[in-house]
Amino acid sequence: MRTWAVVVAGGSGARFGGLKQFSSLRGRPVAAWSVDAARSVAEGVVLVVPAGSVAVGGTCGADIVVPGGDTRSGSVRAGLAVVPEDVGVVVVHDAARPLASPALFRAVVGAVDGTTSREQAPDGAVPGVAVSDTLKRVEHGLVVGTVDRAAVVAVQTPQAFRAASLRAAHQAGGTATDDAGLVESIGGIVRVVPGEPWNLKVTLPSDLAVADLLVVR
């Protein structure tokens, strides 16, 4: 199946203190690293940037650059709108995760298009990593329970989806912290593949410094 990618770089970078997606990592914009990794599986890459900043960071190697929406989900919809209708798989990736490897992209796409598993292909696939910290449920500053960490994973991007399932999930115009949440909300099946511990999300300037130390490609 034809595969395209939507790289989401629509955040304002409030906690970072600026547009982190265009900050330099080893001489290249952070978003360019993410676009480059997405290119390893996608024949076309859409970069979604904050409204009003289309010309700020250039294309970062993407085929199409579009302005995003007011929310992350709105930005994904803006990117999805320009993905050709005959594309079978869409990968959604946060530009702020510049260290995701091409192998991780292949893993999520392979889980969706059936090339890496004999099981029935799901609607989507996400990378997950085990949680090492103890998790507590808290209400009004008080602990009300402990979560069994063996039953949870921390989810990353890239996330791959059957294009029809992703479009259907976005049709209602809802919002979620990731696209898998929207696909789950319409009854879609989402498979978890092993994530990468080094696939950090650049949120603070210190994260960018760590990413600089971890770059291997």
Image: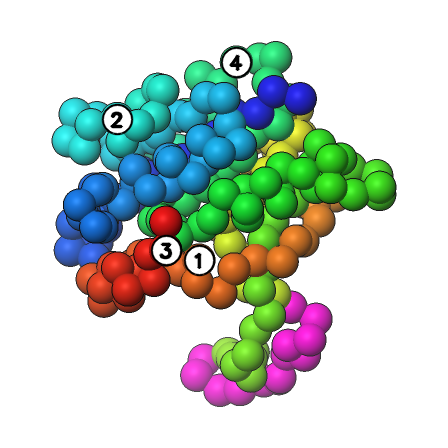
Q: Which residues are magenta?
A: 140-152
Q: Is residue 8 left or right of residue 177?
A: left
Disc on res. 199:
1
Mark 1 vs mark 2: which is more N-terminal? 2
- Residue that carries the numbered disc 4 in the rendered image: 84
Mark 1 vs mark 4: which is more N-terminal? 4
Secondary structure of the residue carrying tag 1 is loop
48 up-or-down from 147: above or below: above
Q: Residue furthest front?
A: 217
Point out the frontmost of discs 4 and 3. Answer: 3
Q: Is residue 39 left or right of residue 184?
A: left
Q: CA distance from mark 2 to mark 4?
A: 19 Å
Disc on res. 59:
2
Q: CA distance from mark 1 to mark 2?
A: 23 Å
Q: CA distance from mark 3 to mark 2?
A: 23 Å
Question: What is the crowding at mark 1: few (fewer than 14 residues within 10 Å), some, or many (at least 20)?
Answer: many
Secondary structure of the residue carrying tag 4 is loop
The reply to whether the magenta stretch includes residue 147 is yes
Q: CA distance from mark 4 to mark 3?
A: 33 Å
Residue drawn at (36%, 20%) of the image: 63
Mark 3 vs mark 2: which is more N-terminal? 2
Q: CA distance from mark 3 to mark 1?
A: 12 Å
